[in-house]
Image (spheres, helix red, strand yellow):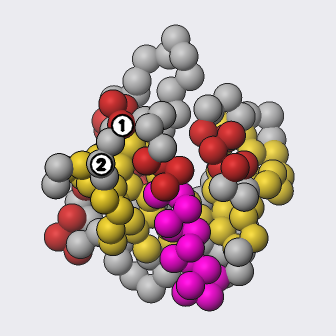
Amino acid sequence: MNYKIREIRESEYPILADFLYEAIFIPEGMEKPPKSIIEQPELQVYITDFGKADDWCLVAEVEERIVGAVWVRIMDDYGHIDAETPSFAMALHEEYRHLGIGTALMRAMLQLLKDKGYRQASLSVQKANYAVNMYRKAGFEVGDENEEEYIMICRL
């Protein structure tokens, strides 16, 4: 599949709300929550006022349609480590998953962060999420965990 990875344009920031919803892991057999779930403050932290210092986003395009996004910011989210470590959020539209696009987005963002001088990045992922393996392959290691989630760190 042909796709292009590029930085998001400011005019495209509103699509992050759609990808935030897509990023919610739904265990097999569970129903999707209503889209309004992203209005919760603990989720809004990922997208509110996006575009500040330390906010970076890459998108994947197929035939000029954005099909995936990876974005980071330093925020007090589930994967928060410290005030210098950006936290990841990433999602692809369902029909574009398992094609290598997510891995390419992840690698591109890690390189961008390294080029910008960041020392590490973090994320939070539910243990049952198939993406855990992709994160491990990209260089993330479990730094902490609770009953349901891993907090993973990638040293840059």
Mark seen at residue 30: none
Residue underneath mark 2: 2
What residue is rendered at 67% in x and 62% in y? 122
Kindly indicate the quadrant of the structure image that contains residue 147.
top right
- Asked if 131 appears above or below 71 in the picture, the reply is above
Give x and y (percent) for residue 88: 55, 60
- Label 2 Cα neighbours within 10 Å, binned few <14 / some 14-19 / many ≥20: few
Q: Taking the image as drawn, is residue 129 in sight?
A: yes
Marks 1 & 2, CB-CB < 8 Å contact? no
Q: Nearer the viewer, residue 61 or 142?
A: 61
- Asked if 7 appears above or below 139 in the picture, the reply is below
Give x and y (percent) for residue 57: 40, 68
What residue is rendered at 81% in x and 46% in y? 145
Give x and y (percent) for residue 20: 39, 48
Task: Using residue 102 as the reference point, say whether residue 35 is left or right of it.
Answer: left
The magenta span reads 105-118
Residue underneath mark 1: 96
Q: Is residue 110 magenta?
A: yes
Mark 1 or mark 2: whose residue is earlier in sequence: 2
What residue is rendered at 75% in x and 70% in y? 155
